[in-house]
Image (cartoon, rainbow, N blue to C red):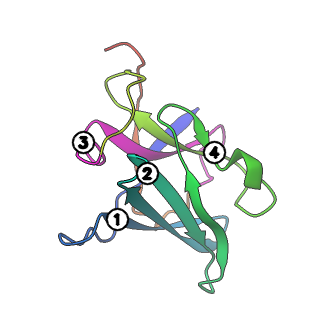
Amino acid sequence: MSLYILEPTEQPEQRPEWDYQVELGGLVWRLVLRWFERFEQWGLTVYDDTDTLMVSQEPILVNRPCLTHHTGRIPTGGQLWLLSLNGSDEACSYDDLGTRCQLVWATDDDEALDEDSSAEEFTYSATP
């Protein structure tokens, strides 16, 4: 299995959201992670390469696959995860995204990410 950290293309300082663009299966996907203060949780919105909304504000949990209910709308060949890099199952707080918690594309196929992707391959160990 290969794991790729998805690097944000933009993180505005005044807004609680992260913006990602990654090329998967020949299409550019825009992923927006937004912090919901009321629920103290991150939500994920997905747009396709034509900026068409595919998934809206799906709550995501740490160390669980994201978008499992939307498999017909998102690229195949891998799964999107919000991983805790220290192996903890503690919820990903506002301050944890980008440090302790990273958005990751996991795949059995080493070719799932296009060569031009900004994602960085890494090895994950659940042992702190």
The answer for how far apart the CA atoms under marks 2 and 1 are is 9 Å
Q: Nearer the viewer, residue 60 or 47?
A: 60
- Res. 79 mark: 4
For the point 41% across and 30% down, the residue is 123
Amino acid on which disc 1 is placed: Glu
Mark 3 — residue?
99
- Residue most extreme to the front: 38
The answer for how far apart the CA atoms under marks 3 and 2 are is 14 Å
Please indicate whether residue 98 sits to the left or right of residue 108 in the image.
Answer: left
Residue 57: x %, y % from top left: 56, 62
Is 25 above or below relative to 85?
below
Q: Which residues are magenta?
A: 94-112
Badge 4 vs badge 2, beta-carbon distance below 8 Å: no
The answer for how far apart the CA atoms under marks 3 and 4 are is 20 Å
For the point 52% across and 58% down, the residue is 44
Q: Of helix, strand and loop, which one carries label 3?
A: loop
Mark 1 — residue?
17
The answer for how far apart the CA atoms under marks 4 and 2 are is 17 Å
Amino acid on which disc 3 is placed: Thr
